[in-house]
Image: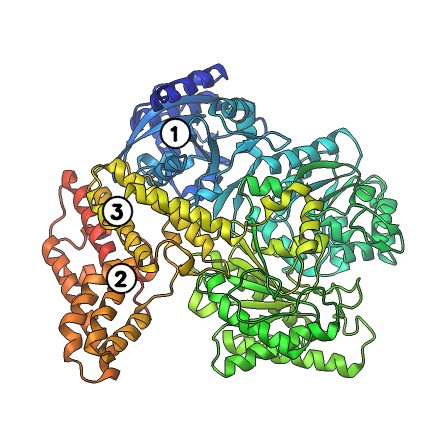
Amino acid sequence: MTKQPEALLEYNLIQQLVGLDYTLVKVQDGDALVSNLKSQLEVFNKASYSDKEFDAILNHLAKGNVFEKAKTLRDRFSFSREGGEVIYVRFYDSENWNNNLFQVTSQVQQTGSYLNRYDVTLLVNGLPLVQIELKRRGVEIKEAFNQINRYQLHSFWSNNGLFQYVQVFVISNGVNTKYLANNKLQSVKQTFYWADSKNKNVTELTNFASEFLNPNHLGKMIAQYIVMNETHKNMMVLRPYQYFATEAIIQQVKTCNDNGYIWHTTGSGKTLTSFKASQILMEVPEVYKVVFVVDRKDLDYQTMKEFNAFKEGSVDSTDNTTSLVNQFLGIFKDKKGVRKDSDLIITTIQKLNNAISGHYRNQLEPLKNERFVFIFDECHRSQFGETHGRITEFFSKSQLFGFTGTPIFAENASKNELGKRTTKDLFGNCLHKYVITDAIRDENVLRFGIEYLGKYKNKSNTFFDIEVEDIDKKEVFDAPKRLTKIVDYMIAIHSQKTFNKDYSALFAVSSIDNAIKYYDIFQQKKEAGEHDLRIATIFTYGANEDNAFAQDFLPDGEMSIAAEPKSSYQLSHTRDKLEGYIGDYNAMYKTSFTTKDQQQFENYFKDISKRLKEREKLTFNDEKDRLDIVIVVNMMLTGFDAKKVNTLYVDKNLKQHGLIQAFSRTNRILGEQKSQGNILCFRNLKKATDDAITLFSNKDAIEVVTMPDYEVIAEKFDEALKNLREIAPTYQSVNDLQSEDDEAAFVQAFRKLLRHMNVLQSYTDFDWDDLPLDEQEFEDYKGKYLDLYEKVKRDTQKEKTSILDDIDFELELIHRDRINVAYILKLLAKLKDSKTTDAKAQKKAIMDLLGGDIQLRSKRELIEKFIDENLPHITDMDAIEEEFEKYWHDEKVLALAKICEDENLDKAQFNALLNSYIYSGQEPIRDDVFKCLDNRPSILKAREIGERILSKMKEFVEVFVNGMVG
């Protein structure tokens, strides 16, 4: 049977869309797009525009980047006619989305840096809001994703930037179909399958078109289910389970007074779902106000930040009970004294309890019969006291909805003064369910790589023997000798687990006393020069974990110094210790936090959180701001999300929802390199883990949720190697590959091997001796892989098309070592000091290292020249650094002079432009480049010359600047 060609896939889709009430329109190029836009906007707005008026509209539409244009789409534009009449132009109707005009076109051509032709475009009121890229059956869907990224770079910005109005991309090979929001610098991990309300994925293109692209559903998604994230300045589109959960809550509020809860596994984006539900409910006329309730003060702040990220100024958190009461009454004033009456309130359960008790109760009496909707975050924690009864008794017409990743069932319910109560007892029926197995299958969260470290393990490379089996004696667990061995082990393994400290870790310990002991051991070893890890700890002094109900988190109200009747000496000791640890933190990061002021202590917690959360940002300064390990008792083990945390060390007993919550701190998706959440248990939690996974999914889920044994991954590696050797028996045979198809097969085969290696190296048991190839041969294959990558890069710059162009080389799997100029200089000093017999081998090792690092390959030739021509003449070892810097500077000056000479550029002006580019990271516009030229080029030559100079500029920075800061 022949494979269905891409053209037939496209034709069938267009016919299906016409059947779904899209109007087929022929739009061949940018001019036709603009012409069609004018006529569609006129019909949609029931108006006609003169050429001059439409030019003003077009100029308005051309402003801003993708994020700003998404706001323009949802806004109105006004202009005055000559007679003084003010005309309003709308671009999209979000209230009645079926009023919008839906068209379909295909093969639109646009020229930016290059000529691109797009597959299928869905126009709404003339603007391209959905772009569909297709690949024939059998081609991996990732190629369509990479094509979109190229179009964003090469041409979407041309022709008034109208294609920057795309809200949703769809990628498909007919069999697999996914959608994603329009953002720059995306990973394929941000692409989603659509699904039905039972989480059954809709993968076939025809089914996806029927369910997702029909005008009613697509109109609603664009109107209500795309969220602007103000923090990251990007768009987020809701996933199917978030959509169905929100719809279920809205339906419940509109049709009855029953409560309900949403069970969405930890890490699947409950905050976004709850925000969206709150936002839509605010528009329901019958709802007086929506109150979002958290159970911890730190989450109050965190949720306010996230909600305001989704919609600027959408909510104020409440500093105290008085301000909460004022928000309820609509007389709240912000810190500047400006009155704000918001329909959405965020508060803690403690403040809410205070507001409906005591002297505040009378003030709220007039609101007793108003219809409030309360949404409880992490409702498995917050709702099991008397407060639940007080809320329902006082606000008699209220509706309560809970969100949880780990519901309370009969099996994991704790007893309190009101008896054992489950989530269902308090909230009624579950309105939507998305459990951990669903999320792992959809790749919305990662699996856990769990290692139980100790003597009962069959095979282990560990160098210590922690007694873990069936020990329940506190004195054994807390013995200094055991704790020291654990610290030694963590120091030895941490780089391997975190890709050379590229990720951070949490360390969960059993008590505040042990947090203190562990921190002190780490510090002693740091002072002795045994490690350079950056360690911090946070706990609330006075909290005692021996009491099952004592919680180690920021209290809401005055800092409780005596949560338990400890002696005043112990409390003072705990606080003094923490004050000292905060002093270490202040010295490390030049901050000034303290326990002596409650606000400053809260700010210390916020600073630690921010340091972990913001590591994923491109602007994060890793050398200056990195934090490696945070030692915690309970804090940060629930409700805390940071994608750059990939490891949890555990030396405490965890079970049921507490275990899943803690493990889930590590399982947020982030690119190809982060393949699983690493869990290293220094206690035997095997049975507790299996029981917890069974409780929150089913008994068959253990294999789905946890990573397989090391041996299983090693077998997969062997299989991938066998496949690779069939294509290229040796690394030299890569040179003999006959066609681009053969090269593509090699790239895909080696990429598969890389993925398995990435996972294998995260296991404690990893050992090159276990593998059927040695490290050198692996590096040699990797060099050939990177050669092909560079070939594609060069061909793209020459406007050559290549089938390798859309294959993702997943370079993040390769760049794992912190190699910079300082590292190279150490190697050069070692080379200079070595005997003649060793020198050749050491030089080869340096060249292999440079060849295997994607950033340093460009510098290989220059460094080799320094080794051959300069290094032999340096007699003083201490002078190597100075000589290398001088050499690098001279080569840089020569390279710059050559670019200026070849391109007839003014040296001073071009140097200034280059420095501006290095400093800001922003690519200069072509006009700035042309100002450096002796003569401005003709229009016909301008694009070619501009692109060539920009390309040389980028190459200069890649060689002489990137990776050379030591």
Question: Mark 3 touching mark 1, by CB under 8 A?
Answer: no
Q: Secondary structure at mark 1?
A: loop
Q: Is residue 759 above or below residue 101?
A: below
Give the quadrant of the N terminus: top left
Q: Residue furthest front?
A: 458
Q: Is residue 17 visible?
A: yes
Amino acid at pointer 2: Asp
Mark 1 surroundings within 10 Å by alpha-carbon count, few (fewer than 14), some (14 through 19), many (20 or more): few
Q: Earlier in the sequence, mark 3 or mark 1?
A: 1
- Residue 788 - label: 3
Badge 1 is on which residue? 138
Could you say where residue 860 lies in the image, as x and y percent from the top left? 22, 62
392 vs 213, left or right, is: right
Which of the 4 image quadrants contains residue 136? top left
Q: Disc 3 to disc 2, how far (Cα)?
A: 16 Å
Q: Which kind of residue does numbered mark 1 sit on?
A: Gly
| Numbered circle sitting on residue 848 | 2
